[in-house]
Image: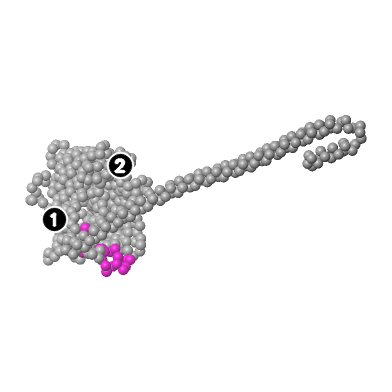
């Protein structure tokens, strides 16, 4: 309601009212004015309160809006932070990828370089082939030294086969008992065809003397020991898995697969002569076989003076770590040779070897080891040099066992044991019987990079009996003996690297050896005339012991 309407109504009521109230009209009007003022003030305050409420609501809305803005900004900050982390991780991944790509590029560059070198080598080989230019190589073996006894005299009949059993192939340890000067020089010429096939020619010259002089023409045994040619990687065989790796050869040679016990200076197998063969035929993936035919000569036949020629046909097979070698041999008219004291000399024979080769020391430590057994009959009873000994009976038999290996004991010691044992019967004469056992132990102790001490101990047992059919060329010849032999050697040694193992050469050695044996071995021989009585083998030594001193060089390359 408006103020004017309210005031008019009140005034009208007062005018028409009773007269007794007229006097109070002024008072009422005044009150009405005051009341109206208060109402105006109340309305004003209400309006102001409403205005303040609206302002508060507006500020609340603004605050809420600011809060939402702050929350949005916080989310934006969080989003930017996550984005930054993501970008950082992506940068790390990109860096790693870049590094990998760089390495791949480096590898590719290296491969390209290798390929370029291979291509260059092939081109060079082709160029050589086109011009007929061969590849030459030179390698060999040599040893040279001297020995003297404790009286300062020269020694004779000394070596790895110096004992009575030596005539049967019974060796002792070689360290400290080699006074000879021996050299092998090997020259190879190889031509490689552009197809990959190759030919190789080998020439080997050897010489051995005992004299210490520099000029040895009068004593020289200079000899051509090998001269042969071989062909390999032939394209005619390329389509066959059996023959694709085969190697053909012909000429005069040592068989490629001969091997020895170095510490005895004794071959396990020495197959050599003039002939032909094929190597590396593979009937299966794990079986490799060689087939060879060699010819050798024993001597002349009475009265024609024709040479007795022996033949050795060998099949040598490798299956994993196993080696199986079978040889047959024959020599027509061998019993008719001059100077042979037999009427029943062998004219044929067989030889068998079974070997087991390990790339470790008997499965216990690093190194290598080889073990095997050999059997021979007739001409095959010579177990080492196949078909190389003609003065054997037709019933001769031999069994030989061998085992050896090398291994480091620790950083300061290494050891190489070797054992050979043999039994033969009806060998030279019907009814003879021979048994020997040789045990050798080589130790090396590196002290500096270029100096070491080498030690060797040998034991050999011999039981020898030439039997009742020995031809007695002289009366009272001793043809039966049994006993033991011992050797101990100390060898201070220089070489390029003492950490290189037992086979590091060249070696420059000082030698001190002590030898002792049972007296029963003195004077034994195989029925031949003796030069001096009561001596040990061919040494001329009496008694039962001897000292040796010397120097030696040994090398191979």
Viewer-side residue, 16 vs 384: 16
Mark 1 vs mark 2: in front: 2
Q: Which residue is mark 1?
A: 223
Give the CA separation, mark 1 to mark 2: 37 Å
Q: In the image, is 145 to the left or to the right of 30?
A: left
* Residue at the image position 20 percent from the left and 47 percent from the top: 555
Tell whether position 249 is magenta.
yes
Tell whether position 552 is magenta.
no
* Residue at the image position 28 percent from the left and 55 percent from the top: 113
* Residue at the image position 32 percent from the left and 45 percent from the top: 407
Quick check: can you spot residue 451?
A: yes
Q: Earlier in the sequence, mark 1 or mark 2?
A: 1
Residue 183: x %, y % from top left? 16, 50
The quarter in which the N terminus is drawn is top right
Viewer-side residue, 538 vs 120: 120
Q: In the image, is 98 to the left or to the right of 127?
A: right
Number of on-image labels? 2
Residue 404: x %, y % from top left? 30, 48
| Label 2 element class | strand
| Label 1 element class | strand
Please give the range of residues in magenta: 231-255
Quick check: can you spot residue 394?
A: no
User: Is the residue under label 2 in contact with that under label 1 (CB below 8 Å)?
Assistant: no
Viewer-side residue, 515 vs 512: 512
């Amino acid at each position: 309601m408006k103020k004017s309407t309210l005031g008019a109504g009140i005034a009208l009521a007062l005018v028409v009212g009773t007269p007794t109230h007229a006097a109070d009209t002024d008072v009422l009007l005044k009150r009405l004015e005051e009341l109206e003022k208060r109402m105006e003030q109340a309305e004003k305050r209400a309006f102001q309160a409403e205005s303040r409420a609206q302002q508060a609501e507006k500020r609340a809305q603004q605050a809420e809006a600011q809060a939402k803005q702050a929350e949005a900004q916080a989310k934006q900050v969080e989003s930017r932070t996550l984005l930054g982390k993501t970008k950082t991780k992506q940068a790390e991944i990109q860096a790693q990828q870049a590094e990998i790509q760089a390495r791949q590029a480096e590898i590719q560059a290296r491969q390209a370089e290798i390929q370029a070198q291979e291509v260059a080598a092939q081109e060079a080989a082709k160029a050589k082939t086109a011009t007929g230019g061969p590849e030459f190589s030179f390698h060999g073996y040599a040893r040279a030294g001297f020995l003297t006894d404790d009286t300062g005299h020269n020694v004779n009949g000394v070596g790895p086969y110096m004992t009575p059993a030596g005539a049967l192939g019974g060796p002792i340890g070689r360290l400290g008992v080699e006074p000879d000067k021996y050299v092998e020089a090997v020259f190879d010429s190889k031509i490689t065809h552009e197809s990959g096939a190759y030919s190789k020619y080998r020439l080997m010259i050897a010489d051995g003397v005992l004299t210490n002089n520099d000029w040895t023409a009068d004593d020289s045994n200079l000899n051509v020991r090998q001269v042969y040619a071989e062909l390999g990687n032939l394209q005619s065989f390329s389509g066959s898995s059996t023959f694709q790796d085969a190697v053909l050869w012909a000429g005069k040679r040592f068989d490629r697969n001969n091997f020895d016990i170095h510490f005895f200076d004794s071959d396990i197998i020495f197959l050599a002569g003039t002939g032909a063969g094929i190597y590396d035929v593979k009937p299966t993936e794990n079986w490799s076989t060689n087939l060879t035919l060699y010819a050798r000569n024993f001597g002349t036949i009475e009265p024609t003076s024709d040479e007795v020629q022996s033949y050795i046909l060998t099949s040598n097979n490798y299956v994993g770590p196993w080696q199986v070698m079978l040889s047959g041999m024959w020599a027509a008219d061998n019993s008719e040779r001059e100077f042979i004291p037999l009427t029943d000399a062998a004219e044929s024979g067989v030889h068998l070897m079974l070997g087991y080769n390990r790339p470790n020391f008997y499965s216990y430590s690093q190194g290598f080891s080889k073990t095997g057994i050999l059997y021979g009959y007739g001409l095959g009873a010579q177990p080492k040099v196949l078909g190389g000994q003609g003065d054997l009976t037709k019933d001769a038999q031999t069994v030989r066992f061998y085992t050896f290996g090398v291994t480091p004991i620790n950083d300061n010691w290494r050891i190489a044991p070797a054992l050979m044992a043999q039994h033969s019967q009806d060998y030279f004469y019907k009814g003879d019987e021979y048994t020997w056992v040789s045990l050798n132990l080589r130790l090396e102790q590196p002290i500096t990079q270029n100096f070491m001490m080498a030690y060797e101990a040998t034991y050999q047992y011999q039981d020898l009996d030439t039997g009742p059919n020995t031809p007695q060329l002289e009366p009272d010849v001793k043809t039966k003996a049994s006993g033991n032999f011992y050797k101990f050697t100390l060898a201070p040694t220089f070489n390029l690297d003492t950490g290189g193992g037992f086979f590091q050469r060249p070696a420059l050695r000082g030698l001190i050896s002590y030898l002792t044996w049972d007296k029963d071995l003195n004077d034994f021989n195989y029925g031949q005339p003796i030069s001096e009585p009561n001596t040990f083998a061919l040494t001329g030594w009496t008694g039962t012991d001897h000292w040796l001193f010397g120097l030696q060089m040994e090398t191979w390359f």
